[in-house]
Image (cartoon, helix red, strand yellow):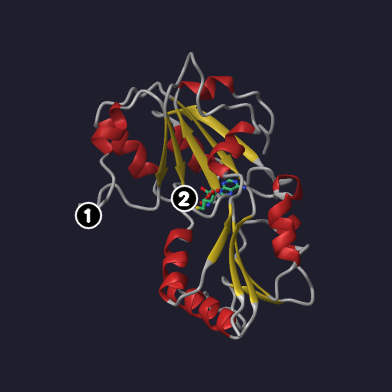
Amino acid sequence: MIGKAYLVGSGPGGLGLLTLRAREVIDSADVVLYDQLPGEEILSTLPRDAELIDCGKYGGNHTLKQHEIEALMVERVKAGKVVVRLKGGDPFLFGRGGEEIEVLREHGISVEVVPGVTSAIAVPEMVGIPVTHRRYASEVTFITGHEDPTKPESALDWEVLSRLKGTLVILMGVKNLPAIAAALAAHGKDPATPVAIIERGLRPDQRVTVGTLADIVEAARARGVRPPAVIVIGGVVNLYDGEGLSG
Ligand code: SAH
């Protein structure tokens, strides 16, 4: 008796951007493994009779390691359960979804992936910033800000990134913003390039901070910018519609 595994994207937050397929699959689950990124509006609708596993606070306050999450999924599927791994945004963009399906497949478990609306596009979009635009950007690059650019083992080539003419969208970049801005500036990116930081996009307490590459670090510090936030760098930021500029 073997169950079934689903890797499901929740969208950036809010029931309106959860897909119909995601809703259907979540509602059929025996087990849901989640973290806080999908946001309260979605998490409050998880099926009450399912086993709900908060991967950030397992058994009190233990944050599950990636291998522990994978092991739990394998174990529950092998026990015959319908298991949903719920991820913020789209499961294959910086969500470690790719790693999770690899592990499940190694155990002979097939996985259905349910794509989600990614925060990398939707969060800027909802404040009027298109990630591409004929006048400003014919290309967009999605970057993890998780890596410290000053570390020699960084997988990112900041010299190449700073030469790109299109939009840079950085996820998980709040902590390393000073190092990222410095790396781009050091490789010749125009200090006047517009930058927007959208915190808690699509949540009631969404907040937007705008500036330039030269002054965004100070602006973020002064306003106490915190994750989760999407950072957008490029001319498209000029289209920001001013909504959400509060706090
Ligand atoms: N797979 C997700 C991204 C996971 S990485 C997706 O496709 O959206 C986690 C990062 O996503 C956060 O650090 C933040 O940069 C971004 N993020 C996700 N949801 C967000 C939201 N509602 N508002 C702002 N940033 C968000």
| Viewport quadrant of the C terminus | top right
Amino acid carrying label 1: it is Glu
Is 96 situated above or below 215?
below
Q: Which mark is residue 153?
A: 1
Pointer 2 residue Cβ closer than 8 Å to ligand 1? yes
Task: Say what secondary structure mark 1 lies in.
Answer: loop
Name the residue: 54% across, 45% down: 229
Amino acid carrying label 2: it is Met
128 vs 99, left or right, is right
- Residue neighbourhood size for the residue with mark 2, other residues' Cα within 10 Å, grouped as few (<14), some (14–19), many (≥20): some
Q: Nearer the viewer, residue 188 or 74?
A: 74
Residue 38 appears in the picture as rendered: yes
Position in image of residue 212 (x %, y %): 44, 26
Q: Which mark is residue 65?
A: none
Pointer 1 residue Cβ closer than 8 Å to ligand 1? no
Position in image of residue 141 (x %, y %): 40, 35
Name the residue: 79% across, 77% down: 49
Task: Say what secondary structure mark 2 lies in.
Answer: loop
